[in-house]
Image (spheres, helix red, strand yellow):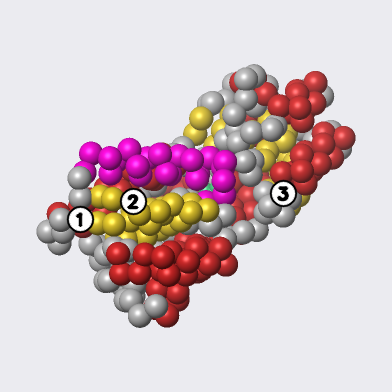
Amino acid sequence: MRKALGLMLMLAVLLGLTGCSEKQENAENPKLLLGFSQLGSESSYRIGNTKDIEEQAAACGISLMMKNANQKQENQIADIRSLIAYRVDVIAFSPIVEEGWDTVLTEAKKAGIPVVLVDRTIQTRDESLYAAQIGSDFYKEGVMAAEYLIRKADRMELDQIRIVEIRGTENSTPMKQRQQGFMDTIAGDARMRVLDSVDGDFLRSRGAECMRKMLETYGDQIDAVFSHNDEMTIGALPEIEAAGYTPGKDILLISIDGGQDAIDLLKEGKINCIVECTPKLGAVLMETAMKLKRGETVERVIHPEEQVFTDEQDLSQLAPRGY
Ligand code: GYE
């Protein structure tokens, strides 16, 4: 009995790791060609997401056609068109921005190819243009970032926190929802004041540039930076130091993603809070693609579980992040 239980447990762990119940092709798991249009390689999140999708496809015996649009919506539309022409079984993509997909997705629908949105979502008048969306709850991420700042103000008995925000790519889902969640949460707290909000496009170089300019404009008025991803946070850090401030102390830093480099900086005390945004969506994507291929219904929206890492915790035992 104990042996059987142990075996079952091991199987469950293995399944959890690969996300697949069957590798070989059979009636239950027909051969599947998945086309994926990645939006670019702007961050460790994105690189981790691409790697995870490749690994999970391989683990499930799914053939993958991976495209990279290098941060341009027109490239992404062209990539989706080529996946339609290739007649893949399922198309998945991470939409760089929310608007402008109806034409190409109508083409996919006419070709009878189901579409899965991964990571970000879209705005459309025709909800039937995609079957499912697998991605983080970005609004909740913004809320968690703001909640940390409120706790910090309580703990340090601060009577005001002047904030600058470095936003992700304009009109992208994470940029819009993280901002909304954050602003809604600080709105009820009179200590919080937003000095400025600028577009850093999720890029390290832009994070640095934005920070430099804001330090020139606001100098020592800046108490906290809310940066929409680790990449921009890592870009901003040396600018803060170069201006003579100690990151994590003179200026509080709040970031999103939770890649290894940022976690290391949190452990060093240079970043105060990181809200996790996991790029590991591959296993759920494979499962969803297989269900679509079999003609089964799938869950419309799937959010992964996420946590917050802060200077309030002991992170010495934290497992390697893998991105
Ligand atoms: O936070 C950022 C990336 O869409 C959730 O895109 C993703 C964001 C992620 O470039 O680092």
Q: Of label 2 and label 1, which has the lower sequence position?
A: 1
Q: Is residue 295 left or right of residue 193?
A: right
Which residue lies at the image location 43% right of the left edge and 70% below the top edge? 216
Q: Is residue 195 visible?
A: yes
Q: Is residue 300 left or right of residue 37?
A: left
Question: Tag 3: Cα neighbours inside 10 Å, few (<14), some, or many (≥20)?
Answer: few
Q: Of label 3 and label 2, which has the lower sequence position?
A: 3
Tell me where residue 122 appears, x and y as whole percent: 60, 33
Task: Please name the amino acid that badge 3 sits on.
Answer: Lys
Tell me where residue 156 appears, x and y as whole percent: 15, 62
105 and 222: which one is in front? 222
Which residue lies at the image location 57% right of the left edge and 41% below the top edge? 171
Please report the bounds of the magenta region as a residue range: 168-189
Which residue lies at the image location 50% right of the left edge and 44% below the top edge? 174
Q: Of label 3 and label 1, which has the lower sequence position?
A: 3
207 and 82: which one is in front? 207
How far apart are the alpha carbons under marks 3 and 1?
A: 40 Å
Q: Secondary structure at mark 1?
A: loop
Question: Pointers 3 and 2 in contact (CB under 8 A)?
Answer: no
Q: Which residue is mark 2?
A: 194
Q: Which residue is mark 1?
A: 160
| Number of dots carrying numbers | 3
Which residue lies at the image location 47% right of the left edge and 70% below the top edge? 212
Tell me where residue 255 appears, x and y as whole percent: 40, 58
Q: Which residue is mark 3?
A: 72
Task: Please name the amino acid that badge 2 sits on.
Answer: Val
Tell me where residue 172 appears, x and y as whole percent: 56, 42
